[in-house]
Image (cartoon, grey):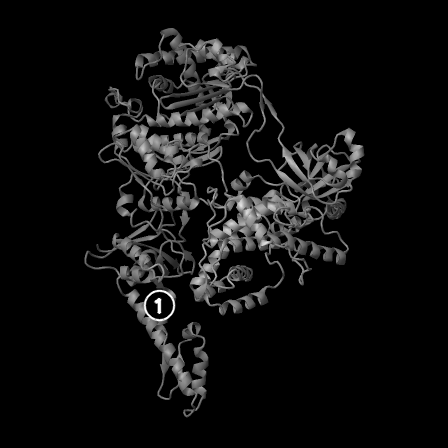
Amino acid sequence: DKIADEFLTSTNILGTQRPLAAVVVTQLLPKQDMFRINEICRANHIAFMLALNNGVTSTLFSDFGPTHEIMDATGEPTQTLAVSNMEVFESIDVDLLKIQGIKQDQPVIIVTVAQAEHGLDDGDIVTLDDMRDELEHWNGKQLKVKRVAIASPNDAKLDTNGVAFKEALKLPTSSVIQTFGRQYEYYKKQHEESENKDKKLQVRSITMFNRLAFVLDEEDSSNSIQAFKTYQAGGLLNQIRPPIQASYKSFQETLEQTPVPQMLRGEEWESGHGIEIHLSIAAVLDFYDKEGHWPGIHNHDDAKKVVELAQAISDARADKQSEDDGATYCWSQKVEWAFPTGEKRDLDTKKIELYSRLFGTELTGFCAFLGGAAAQEVLKKSGKFTPINQWVHHDEPSLVVDECASNYAPTFGSRYDYQIAIMGKDFQAQAANQRVFLVGCGALGCEYLKGLALMGVGTGRDGKITVTDMDRIEVSNLSRQFLFRQDDVGHPKSVRGAMAVKKWNPSLNIEALERKVGDDTEDFFNDTFWESLHVCWNALDNVMARQYTDARCLFYSKPLLESGTLGTKCNHEVVLPYRTSSYNDGNEDDNNEQQIAMCTLRSFPYLPIHCMEFAKQSYFSDYFEFGPDQYETFRKDKTTFFEQLDSMGGDEQYRSLRMIQSFLDMQKDPSVPIDFALCIRVAFERMIADYRTSILNLCHSADVMEKSSGKKFWTGTKRRPRPVDWTGATTSSTDLMEYLYATAGLYASVWNVEPVRDRSAFETLVQELNLVQPEWAPPSQNVNLSEGDDDNEGGDESEKVEKLKTDLYSVDVSNLQPASPQDFEKDDDLNFHIDFLTVATNMRSWNYDIKASPRHTVKVTAGRIIPALATTTAMVCGLVDIEFCKLVLGLQSQGRDKFLNSNINLAAGSNNFTTFSPDPPVPITTGLKSPNPETFTSWDKIEVVAPSAAEEMTVEQLVLHVEKLFGVSVDRVFQYGSTEDKAMYNALDKQKLEWDIVIDEDGKATASDGVFTQWPQLRMAVQMLGRLPPASGQRKIFLGQVERIKKSLDQTKEMFLGNFQGPLSKAYRTSYRPEEDEEEGNGKQQYFDTVLESRNYVVLGVHCNSEDGEDITLPPIKYVFPS
């Protein structure tokens, strides 16, 4: 039915008392209706979107009207910069100091910030905050800033990445100007005395990214300069993004006057491929006006008429263009680098014909892509994020691989008719028999399950979808993991996700698992499983798991579909065996954090994030994770603990021992169980130590330094902290009671004690304990006030470490109570974790006069939460669904250019819709010379097969085989991928076969030189046996030592020969079978045996050298032994 004007302009839509905010058209309407609806929307400030899928083409159009205000263009967090210094210059040398718009005699305020890079541009706006003393009234005021650069003569060849330059930037600006002024004058003088004195001195302008200049209004300037001269410490600059005023054109105007419509593929946009799609839409609209219906599916007569209309439209527009040089029309012209040339070209009639024949069809992937992108456009009506630049087309003609009429028609009313009409009946048959492994069933996994079910994947007799996910559904998942409902909370994601899509498509063959995919589940996800797959499909949220599945796909030569989201950002990658690079060829990791100097966290925080990080890294980790873990290791096996301790650094040793001692102090009488009252007392001690004593010690040490040096200490970003003050349960700050509540609750969890959760009962218990704040006394040793990253709080801790070791050696662990280390969990509101971090963060913020952080902010930051958006997820998953269709069609045989990778940010406009063909495999240089292979890729492996069904190859034979095949010397043979220092073969061990120890008739000993490198103590024994007279009683001691080492050498030779000359599979088992664990039993051995027995091969790595001693890199070796 026709959409009435009255509905569009109503101010009470569906009883909401509100007008429409946006209109989204998902099916092309008659031209006059499209124009009318769009114009009404424009006149009434209603956003208008068009999201079309016609066959293998998708189109997204967005119109926010003649005026639209963008409040936040990208959604990226604004900068908060900490001021470390402010300096006022009455005038500057503009030849030396470069600030846009600042004149020679104009006063300027230059701000140095604590961050190495401020990330701001000329003209950006900041709000002043946390200004103090005479500058306090500037808080909340907005100022423009300019970048600050320094001139350096080219001949100085200044290294801006060097340590000297970076250290110079830490100095006051006045010192920087003096230093560079001397440099400038020196080279200027040299230039004036050179042969080139008539030429201009060549200088480079170097931006100092930790400095900004304030731009003051004229009315403020004269009175403000003096105030800024008083700056001592503190101050924050909060970046402000000013609104952007944008204007958009109508559907009618842009349909005609968009000369080069944007395509999702950049190269197609640059070459003008979007012109045919744009003309096709215009032609189809005209076709409806003339014929009264839309083009029929595979109707060649209709297609012919649409082509004729498109040609007529193009010719007419070309004529208009020639008559009006100021206008730009969409017509068939040559395009270079996305710019129209005005030179006519032939219309691609095949593309327009295909558009017409498939006009009435849709594909699941395109619908998901458009749904996510269009929904995100609707949200931009609020002013958040940048709309697309009106039109974005995407075309995938490669999906139409067969023009055989009997393959795509007739259709008989099945749910897959559209797919069949586009890709053929044989595609549908192959899709039904696909075996897909979906790893993960969260936001991405739900979207992929939906797509697979709607496409009919895994519905055939041989088809199957296997989905695995270890997680259970939580309430927070329901907003974006749309397969789940309230009743699903607490149940396995994979099971409930499979149940949901099975209801949609009962023909689906799907198995839901709750198994981890990793190197400890290869007994389940074995060769038979992997070899049966057609594709592995990742829906994961961490790099390590992605790297593992990618490695499996590399080994089994399986295609991998990979994707990820980060708020409004997303990417996807298609990994094709032998044709593209793999995920592991990249350098991804999970650590995207910018590191904060430890001295800042420990003693000089100035931002809320510093307090959050310290609460997480030091307080929570030490008291409830690292501490209990170290204590448990000590309690269970003291010997093992001290062995592990020796591998730690000095600071880490002290931290470990200190934590264990604190847990022992809680058990001064091991026979008395720990109760909740003790948990409160320990929490109180922690509070006083961390928020009072340490603060007073820091201030005392700073005062001592200030007095001795005569220089102010608390300047720049350094804030003088204040201690908390405990006056009693009913009179102290509520934060102090909250700290005791959360901390005691966490200690109760550590000691498996029932906490008191009732607030009133808790307060009563605290009152009964009569907690008293101890008197503070100056410390005997001053606090470390250095600004390095050393975490040592008080100088050399070696004496303290040795004393603690001595004390702990004598502890009887038999009566110690067990503790439970706490694994940080952000989503359990009853475990005290976020409660503790919130109050610990805000008490530290109070210490340093830093703005408090809401609980939600602490949870998001500490839990590293990045919101997953349904819009982003749907869009990227839709694109991956299309790539899956290409795999089913076998397009990989036509090359990687048929496939598409993406990197898209839905928040930042259509210029951030980036797609590209997958990269080729990364070549790995072997170091060999032709005719040997000079490179290989991560897809390659060397297969070595046992000589016969009854005879297995030995390690020696494998080494000789590799050496002969490639002309190399093999140094080591080891388990591929192992990080252990174990080897099945080591050339150094082979050299020991030549070693010998001989004791002659006179009792004198000789040994090969190599023996002394392994057993250096033998040298003295050999020397003494040569010197001591036969009657000496000491000869027996040294002779015994030599005989023991000789026996050890003989055993080493025997073991080496056993491996070297024995069956390779036996050597592998001997070298890598785990040792039995007394506590864990022989489960690891059983797992190793199960995996090895299920395979008829092992995968080995080799280290080898050329004749010249150069390292040679070879692919892994898959050695296949007799079954």
**Image spot of residue 826 (x, y percent):** 48, 43
* Residue occupied by mark 1: 990
Task: Assign the C terminus to one quadrant of the image.
Answer: bottom left
Q: Nearer the viewer, residue 13 or 1045?
A: 13
Give the answer, above or below, for where 497 lies relative to 55: below
Q: Quadrant of residue 141?
A: top right
Q: Position of residue 1044 (x, y in %)?
A: 37, 78
Q: Is residue 202 visible?
A: no
Task: Identify the image quadrant of the N terminus.
Answer: top left
Q: Is residue 1066 left or right of residue 76?
A: left
Please name the amino acid that badge 1 sits on: Lys
**Camera sees residue 23:** yes
Q: Residue furthest left?
A: 950
| Quadrant position of residue 974 | bottom left
- Drawn side of residue 135 relative to residue 1102, left or right: right
Query: Tag 1, which secondary structure?
Result: helix
Residue at 33 percent across and 74 percent down: it is 1050
Q: Position of residue 62 (x, y in %)?
A: 49, 20
Above or below, 906 against 821 in this view is above
Q: How many numbered circles does the render carry?
A: 1
Q: Nearer the viewer, residue 400 or 420?
A: 420
State the residue in front, 714 or 773.
773
Q: Residue at x 41, y 53 (%)?
A: 927
| Spot occupied by residue 427 in the image (x, y as percentages of width and height) | 27, 29
The crowd level at tag 1 (other Cα within 10 Å; few <14, some 14-19, many 20+) is some
In this rendering, position of residue 351 left or right of residue 229: left
